[in-house]
């Protein structure tokens, strides 16, 4: 399997977040993977939420969960990656988030100011 890992400066981490919707179960899953500058896994976690969230809500919760996990690991210098341009732009404060996730984005921004 090919890897698309690109090295980071020493002391920096990459935090990859993702979420999945289990529509038939009315649940969602969140996942976080943390790698160091060499690509070694230094932390991972997942969580199942028993709520009928849509895809963008699930992705927003994954970003929030990833930031909380980074804070718990005492990681200060990192790149947060996810696959939702809507969320990335909202977290960079380039564009406002959809109303359904504005509270989650606000919580994530609040958490990010702790770093």
Image (cartoon, helix red, strand yellow):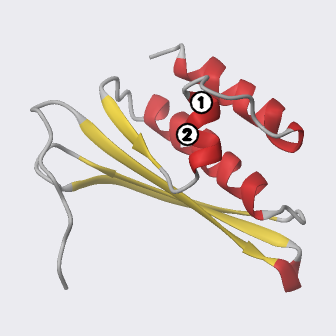
Relative vertical location of residue 33 with respect to residue 65 in this rendering, above or below: below
Q: Residue at x 40, y 35 (%)?
A: 73
Q: Which mark is residue 44?
A: none
> Tags 2 and 1 in contact by the CB under 8 Å rule?
yes
Label 2 sits on residue: 88
Location of residue 28 by image quarter: bottom right
87 shown above or below 92: below
Decide which of 80, 111 is in the foreground and name it: 80
Rendered-image quadrant of the C terminus: top left
Q: Position of residue 93 (x, y in %)?
A: 61, 22
In this picture, is 44 found above or below 87? below
Q: Residues within 10 Å of mark 1 (few under 14, many from 20)?
A: some
Q: Dot 1 corresponds to which residue?
A: 91
Element at badge 1? helix
Looking at the image, the residue that sits furthest to the front is 95
Nearest the eye: 31 or 103? 103
The image quadrant that residue 88 belongs to is top right
Q: Position of residue 95 (x, y in %)?
A: 67, 29
Image point (35%, 29%), residue name: 75
Q: Secondary structure at mark 2?
A: helix
- Position above or below: 45 against 102: below
What residue sits 19% from the left and 59% below the top?
A: 5
């Amino acid at each position: 399997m090919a890897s698309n890992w690109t090295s980071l400066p020493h002391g920096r981490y990459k935090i990859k977040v993702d979420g999945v919707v289990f529509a038939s179960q009315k649940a969602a899953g969140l996942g976080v993977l943390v790698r160091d500058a060499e690509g070694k896994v230094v932390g991972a976690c997942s969580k199942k939420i028993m709520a009928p969230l849509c895809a963008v809500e699930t992705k927003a919760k994954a970003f929030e969960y990833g930031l909380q996990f980074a804070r718990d690991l005492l990681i200060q210098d990192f790149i947060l990656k996810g696959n939702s341009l809507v969320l990335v732009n909202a977290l960079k404060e380039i564009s406002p988030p959809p109303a359904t996730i504005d509270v989650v984005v606000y919580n994530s921004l609040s958490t990010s100011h702790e770093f």
